[in-house]
Image (cartoon, grey):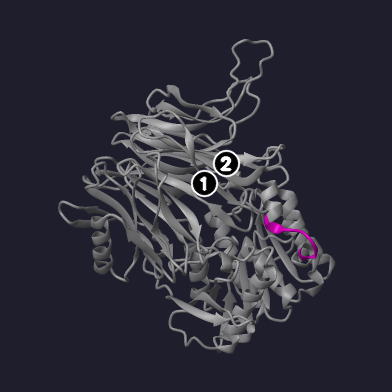
């Protein structure tokens, strides 16, 4: 789920759990496979130092996250310089200020009170782990609230100083009782921060409704956004943007954008190109999101840079310390890149040809002069490798694999296929068949993605690959309600248009049977988040189709989902997204358990901030009271993403055992 915009950060906690019912007895899956696929990525995030001589990356530890530094020139093993236990938080992102100093963002959760909230704070530290300084502003005893976000770095190397950054800051007013020195600033502003001593100076004063600031990579804040709110402080889904001309301090109107829970409109700015004096952003055109540039010279001349008539342009590509705009990305049956930079265009094509499997290539970072590039590669059958490319020597050197636990394991290819929905609509999907199988008469899984405003893409998927390794065919439908295929395909979203979305999901299962890929009595459905909702609701729409249901962190009651947003600023947007009327009850699995015939297995993290754990608890109660077979596993210290190797291993092992027992698979 992606609608709680204040709570999107990923949190890592310890691995403990409880169950409300004993898991079904069955032959356990190969423990080594479950452990290998359940392991977290060895490299979660990686960056390159200004000289290109060092890399830093975040990786998992047994009980948290660690920050490693690698000397790319001298060689040697990566050195862990800092870390966090899961009980204290999680390292989220680290980048280089200089070759001797790093900038890191930490996320943590406040779980003692409801609603559970995620917080972030930013720190700087030396490359050996010393001289740690908190850059996020600290609250005082008089503060009338707590800043949930610790600020975002929007520019660096200010006036040639590698240790100076521009950071946003949420200003929190202080109580004026008994003092004349209380601070009254409130809202989002920008500060110039010294990352060595933590000194700060306000560059953009706090504005109560400000939501966005965009710098130009040269230390100048050029774009500001205001999120419009109602009289109760709830987001209305509309924003106004302002800009400055070069050398001016005056804000002038730029554009407006909106999202009402079902449709996007207007221009959303993303990055400023100082050399061209334009701001790049996305805007719908003829039903598909396109990239535009607006001149910041006073003319506001708008130019369409790129658009398509089949899929959305959904990613702006930048590179280097100052986030230079270099291209765009979009997904057809595979993720495609179109570079504006001829050198990167040529290099990307050359690397794809040179590396095995025609991999997807992502440029992660660059040295200050862009002479050395950090990149990663991945295919459907390769979990990924990181490399450094030196432009001067034309040398490509492997650094670290993204998932070292899967080294040497043969993975299953992912095919792009289509099938017909009941109304004749052609639906795209991805099919993965077990290695060495005939592709016929197999136990099979339909796996709808989460979101619903998301989509699957060609590439490595740890869930899909585990089930394929255990002998299942896996089909991932891009049902109507998925994002990336334009506004008509999105319809009103997968909740208001649930009959269409779930109908497409069920038609995916029928296609597997009609093609002879799935044995009719060995067809199951597995989903996470909205995918878990789709898995449960599929049985409400057609009780006899799937023989087993696995739902991870599922939405189970649409009215409850609306109630969950009551204390958030997105309350009105969530209400609009879900809608009202009979479809809310009819589209809620927990309100229609009498129709569900297949056994159900659910997993949920207690501290889930995207979908409340109460949704799975409700579903568990309703199913048990109706006498339906259900097993519920709750992880009391985890959130929506179950970012813990032991927990993910358990999900894989027990879901496989459950599917085999339910469908009588040897």
* SS label for mark 1: loop
Coordinates of residue 184 in the picture (x, y in percent): 60, 20
Q: Is 568 a magenta residue?
A: no
> Distance from label 1 to label 2 (Cα)?
8 Å
Coordinates of residue 323 in the picture (x, y in percent): 35, 44
Q: Would you name the residue on which mark 1 appears?
A: 63
Q: In this rendering, is residue 94 above or below 346?
A: above
Residue 449: which quarter of the image? bottom right
Coordinates of residue 438 in the picture (x, y in percent): 47, 88
Q: Residue furthest left?
A: 393
Total count of labels: 2
Q: Would you name the residue on which mark 2 appears?
A: 87
Q: Are marks 1 and 2 in contact (CB under 8 Å)?
A: yes
- Comparing 311 with 530, the one in front is 311
Q: Magenta stretch? A: 577-583
- Mark 1 closeness class: few <14, some 14–19, many ≥20 residues within 10 Å: some
């Amino acid at each position: 789920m992606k609608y709680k915009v204040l709570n999107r950060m990923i949190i890592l906690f310890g691995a403990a759990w409880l169950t409300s019912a004993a898991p079904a007895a069955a032959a356990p899956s190969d423990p080594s496979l479950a452990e290998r696929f359940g392991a977290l990525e060895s490299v979660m995030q990686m960056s390159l130092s200004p000289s290109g001589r060092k890399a830093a990356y975040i990786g998992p530890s047994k009980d948290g996250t660690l920050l490693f530094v690698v000397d790319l020139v001298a060689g040697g093993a990566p050195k862990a310089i800092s870390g966090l236990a899961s009980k204290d938080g999680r390292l989220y992102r680290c980048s280089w200020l200089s070759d001797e100093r790093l900038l890191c963002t930490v996320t943590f959760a406040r779980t003692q009170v409801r609603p559970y909230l995620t917080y972030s704070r930013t720190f700087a530290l030396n490359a050996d782990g010393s001289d740690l300084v908190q850059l996020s502003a600290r609250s005082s005893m008089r503060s009338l609230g707590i800043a949930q976000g610790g600020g975002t770095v929007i520019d660096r190397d200010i006036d040639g100083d590698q240790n100076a950054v521009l950071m946003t800051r949420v200003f929190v007013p202080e109580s004026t009782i008994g003092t004349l020195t209380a601070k009254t600033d409130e809202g989002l502003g920008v500060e110039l921060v010294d990352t060595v001593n933590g000194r700060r100076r306000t560059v953009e004063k706090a504005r109560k409704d400000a939501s966005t600031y965009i710098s130009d990579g040269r230390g100048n804040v050029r774009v500001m956004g205001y999120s419009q709110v109602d009289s109760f402080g709830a987001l209305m889904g509309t924003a106004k943007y302002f800009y400055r001309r070069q050398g001016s301090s005056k804000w002038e109107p730029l554009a407006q954008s909106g999202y009402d829970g079902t449709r996007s409109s207007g221009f959303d700015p993303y990055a400023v190109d100082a050399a061209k004096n334009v701001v790049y952003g996305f805007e719908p055109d003829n039903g598909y999101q396109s990239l535009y540039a607006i001149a910041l010279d006073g003319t506001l001349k708008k130019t369409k840079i790129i658009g398509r008539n089949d899929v959305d342009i959904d990613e702006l590509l930048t590179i280097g310390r100052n986030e230079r705009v270099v291209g765009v990305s979009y997904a057809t049956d595979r993720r495609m890149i179109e570079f504006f930079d001829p050198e990167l265009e040529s290099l990307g094509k050359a690397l794809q040809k040179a590396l095995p499997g025609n991999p997807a290539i992502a440029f992660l970072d660059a040295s200050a002069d862009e002479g050395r590039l950090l990149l990663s590669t991945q295919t459907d059958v390769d979990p990924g490798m990181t490399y450094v490319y030196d432009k001067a020597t034309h040398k490509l050197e492997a650094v670290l694999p993204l998932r070292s636990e899967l080294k040497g394991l043969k993975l299953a290819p992912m095919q792009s296929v289509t099938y017909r929905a009941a109304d004749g609509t052609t639906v795209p999907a991805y099919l993965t068949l077990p290695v060495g199988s005939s592709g016929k008469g197999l136990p099979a899984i339909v796996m709808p993605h989460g979101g619903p405003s998301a989509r699957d893409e060609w590439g490595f998927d740890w869930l899909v690959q585990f089930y394929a390794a255990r002998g299942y065919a896996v089909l991932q439908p891009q049902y109507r309600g998925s994002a990336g295929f334009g506004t008509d395909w999105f319809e009103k979203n997968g909740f208001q248009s649930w009959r269409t979305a779930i109908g497409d999901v069920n038609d995916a299962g029928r296609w597997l049977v009609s093609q002879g890929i799935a044995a009719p009595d060995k067809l199951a459905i597995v989903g996470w988040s909205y995918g878990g909702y789709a898995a449960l609701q599929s049985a409400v729409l057609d009780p006899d189709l799937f023989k087993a249901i696995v739902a991870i962190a599922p939405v189970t009651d649409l009215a409850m989902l609306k109630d969950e947003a009551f204390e958030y600023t997105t309350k009105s947007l969530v209400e609009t997204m879900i809608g009202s009327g009979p479809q809310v009850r009819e589209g809620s699995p927990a309100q229609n358990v009498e129709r569900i015939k297949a056994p159900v297995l659910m997993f949920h993290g207690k501290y889930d901030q995207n979908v409340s754990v109460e949704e799975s608890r409700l579903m568990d109660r309703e199913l048990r009271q109706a006498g339906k077979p259900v097993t519920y596993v709750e992880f009391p210290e985890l959130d929506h993403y179950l970012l813990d190797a032991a927990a993910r291993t358990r999900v894989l092992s027990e879901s496989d055992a459950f599917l085999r027992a339910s469908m009588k698979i040897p």
